[in-house]
Amino acid sequence: MPLLSQDAEWDDMYKRLPEPPAGTARRAFAVLTSGGDSQGMNAAVRAIVRVALYNYCDAYAIYEGYVGLVNGGSFIKKMGWGDVSGILSQGGTVIGTARCAEFRDYPGRLKAALNLLERGINNLIVIGGDGSLTGADLFKREWPQYLKDLLQQKAISEELAQRLSYINIVGLVGSIDNDLCGTDNTIGADTALKRIVESIDSISSTAASHQRSFVLEVMGRNCGYLALMAAIASGADWTFIPEQPHGDDWRVAMCDELKRNRERGRRMSLVIMAEGARDRSGTPITAEQVKQAIDSTLHHDTRITVLGHVQRGGAPTVYDRVLGTVCGARAVQYLLHNAGQVRPVVMGVSGSKYITIPLMESIALTQSVPVAIKSKEFARAVELRGPGFVSDVCLLHQLNSADPTHRHVGTRPFKIAIACVGAPASGMNSAIRAAVLAAVDSLHTVIGYHDGFDGIAKGEFEELTWLSVSQLADKGGCVLGTNRSAPNIGQVATSLQKHAVDALILIGGFEAYTGALALVRARSANPALRIPILCLPATISNNVPGTEMSVGSDTALNAIVTCIDTIKQSATSSRARVFVIETHGGNCGYLPVTSALAAGAERAYTPEEGISLSTLVTDLQHFQRRFSEGANCAVIVRGEKASSTYTTPVIEAILGEESRQLFTCRSNVLGHLQQGFTPSPIDRISSVKFAVQCVTTIVSECNRALDATTNTVQVAGSEAAFMVGLKGVGITLTPLEELVEHSDFKLRVPKAQLWTEANLLLHVLGKYDYYNDAKTQAQ
Ligand SMILES: Nc1ncnc2c1ncn2[C@@H]1O[C@H](COP(=O)(O)OP(=O)(O)OP(=O)(O)O)[C@@H](O)[C@H]1O
Ligand SMILES: O=P(O)(O)OC[C@H]1O[C@](O)(CO)[C@@H](O)[C@@H]1O
C-alpha cells in the first residue's frame, strides 16, 4: 500500500490558477465532516482549505456536519491559512461531526441550501461514511427544487439563483470501517487497524503468560475489514466477519481449531470478531457466546475485550494523513479543473493508485452488501467488497488452515531456505512466519540461514517450524540476523548443495536484490544455484526496483512522523523554531518526502534534487516571511544523503545565523529510531502477502523444474528469479534480469521515482509561491 503515485494528469493540476479579475466573485468551497469521526479527517480539511486558498478561492468550514449546514450562522466559518495549522497530527475532526436528523427531511435541507447560497458557495466537499454521502447526493439532486422554493419565498434573488444554478459535490470517505465499495481504503481505517493490532500485541503477552484465550471485539457493523486485516496481521486463531459467517457448527469448528493450535504448542488463543458477527441465519453472535463455547468445550480461562471507541482515537497514521491530504487536495483540484456542473464523485484508492469514482454507484454497491448478507448471499457480499477483500479472505483461510499434518500434493516436498540481507526492517519476521505457514501446509520444509549471505556460506541455519514462527508476527528487527555482505558465490553454492536446498527466499533491500542477481548470473558455473531465487523487498528506504513499496518503510515513516510530531510540539513552548530533521533513506527521497507530507513539514530535501545555495536562500526568505507574520514552527526534513556540503549541522548554522532574530534553528538526526519497534499493520500485511506469493511461486517453479532423473530442481538460465512486489493494483513478480535496466546500481535506487505529487503538494501546503498578490498576503 504505497501512498504516493506519479500521475502526470493530476500533477499538472497543481499549477496555481490565475487570479480572477478584480470585481469578479471568487469561487467558494465548503467542507464538512459527518457521521462517525475518523483519524485523518483533519488532514483532508487542511488540504481542502489550503488548496482552495492557493487557487484564489474562498474556503469555508461547516462545523458539526449537517447540523452546521442546516443551522448556518456561526457554524459556517470562512477559513484562513492559519486556521488549519497544527491539526494534521490530531485525531478526530477539529471542525466537529454529528448525525443530523433534520437534514434527513426536505425542510432541513432547504435551510441548508439557503445557508450556502447566502455565502455564494456551490462547491461542497463532504467527508463521511455512506450515509453522509447519500445525503450529499440527495442534496445535489434536489438543488433545482430548493432554488425554485427559495425564489418563490423571495429568500434569494434571480441573479443568485442563476449564478449558483447547480451545486457540485465531492465525497471523501472518512470511516474507520473501510466499508465503501469502489475504494480499497477509507480515511481512518489504517489508524483504527493500528490501534487494534497494538491492542492485540498487548493482549498476546498477558494471554500467553497465563495460557488464556481472548475474544476481541472490533468495530464493523456490516463490514469485516478491520477484523479480517487484524487477523492477518496478528495471526489470530479464529475470526468472525459479517460477510462470511461460519457454518452452524461454528462452536465445534472454532474449538477444534483452538485445540489443534494449543496441541501444536501455542500458549494462547485469540478470536477476533467484528461487532456485526452473525451466524448463517443472520442471528448476531456475541462475544459472550464465543467465550461460553470456549469455556465449556475447552475449559480455557477465557476473557473478552471490546475495543470500542479506542479504535477511533489517537493520532492518525502516516497512511491516513497522506490519504486525507491527497484526496482533499484532489477534491478541490477536480472541481477547479472540471468546468460547470459535474457528477458527484468520491476520491478513493485502488491499490496504490488514487481514483475518482461515481458517488452513487459506489453508495448503491455499498448498500447492497447488508442486503446480500441478509438474503444469505455471502459469496456475493464478499465479492461486493472488491477484489482486494476477496483475496484477503482467501489469504486468511490459507494461513489459518496451514497444517503440517496435511497430505502433500505435487511432485515431492521441497526444502526452502530463507535468509535476510541488509539492514533490519520491521516486518521481516512477519514475512518469515508467513512463508513458513504457507510452506508447511504442503509438507515443504523451511530452514532459516543466520546473518545473510555470510550465514549461508558458513552453513549456519535453523529449521523453521509452525511453532517456532508462531509468535513472530509482532516482532520488530530480524530473528534470523541480517547483514550487508555480498555473497561469496562459491561458498554459498556449496552450502546450498550440502543442505539440499531447493529454493531460496532473500528478504531485504537493494543488497538482497544485487546479491540475488549475482547468484543467478553464476548459475551456469554452479548447478546448486539453478534453483528458484525470490527476493522479498524489505528495507525502510523503499528503494528497491520492481515494487512501489517495501516491507519496513511504513513502520519507519510512522516512527519518523511520531518523532516530528513530538519535536514540533516542543516549539509550542520555545516558540519560533525551525527544525532540520535528518532521516535515513540513503540516496532515495521516499522517507523524507513522505514523512514531510505526513508531518506537515514545509520542505523536504532529497538526494534526487540535492540542495543548493539558492535553495537555502529561497527557504530562508520564506521562513523569514512566515515567522514575521506569526508562524511559530517550521520543519525541513533532510534525507541523509541530500548533500555532502549542506549537511544538517551546516543548514542549522546557516538558517540560525541568518534568521534576523525571527526564529532559532535546531536539528535532530533521527538515526536508528526510524527502524521502529514493532511492525505497522501495513508492513505486517504486505510482508504476509509477499511471503505467500514467494512460496506459491517457488512451489510451482520447483514442480515445473524438477529433474526426474536426479530428483533435483534445475531451472535454466535466468528463469525463476523474481522480485515480488506491489505495483498499481496488485502483487507482482518481476524477473530480476528485467529490473536491471530500471535500476541505478551506483546510487542504489530505481531509475524512476514516484513522488512528484507529494513534492508539489508540499510546495502548496507549505505556502510557497503564495505571496504574489496583496489580497492573499492578508490571509
Ligand atoms: N438518506 C439520507 N438522506 C439525507 N441525509 C442523510 C441520509 N443518510 C444519512 N444522512 C445524513 O448523514 C448523517 C450521517 O449519516 P450516518 O449516521 O449514516 O453516518 P455515515 O456517514 O454513514 O458514517 P459512519 O460510517 O460513521 O456511520 C446523518 O445523520 C444524516 O444527517
Ligand atoms: O460512535 P457511534 O455513534 O457509537 O458509532 C459506532 C459505529 O461507528 C463506526 O465507528 C463507524 O461507522 C462503526 O464501526 C461503529 O459501529
Image: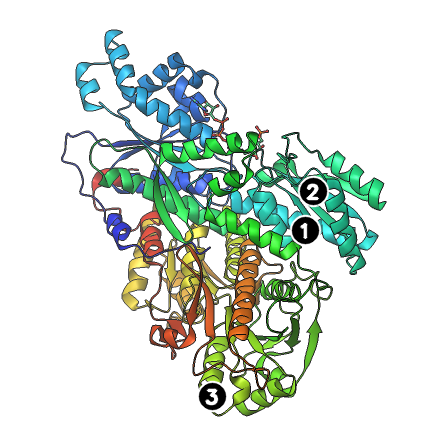
Numbered disc in front, either 2 or 1: 1
Instruction: Look at the image and tell me whether residue 404 can be seen.
Output: yes
In this rendering, would 680 be left or right of 73?
right
Q: Determine the image quadrant of residue 151.
A: top left
Amino acid residing under circle 3: Ala
Q: In whole angstroms, how far apart are the C-alphas of marks 1 and 3?
A: 42 Å
Q: Determine which of the numbered discs, if any, sits on residue 236 in the image.
A: 1
Residue 545, compared with residue 187, is above or below; it is below
| Label located before the other in sequence (2 or 1) | 2
Instruction: Check disc 2 and report its element: helix, strand or loop.
Output: strand
Crowding around mark 2 (Cα neighbors within 10 Å: few <14, some 14 to 19, many 20+) is many
Q: Which residue is mark 3?
A: 522
Q: Quadrant of residue 281?
A: top right
Instruction: Give me the disc on residue 216.
Output: 2
| Marked residue nearer the N-terminal end (2 or 3) | 2
Residue 45 in the image: x percent, y percent?
A: 40, 38
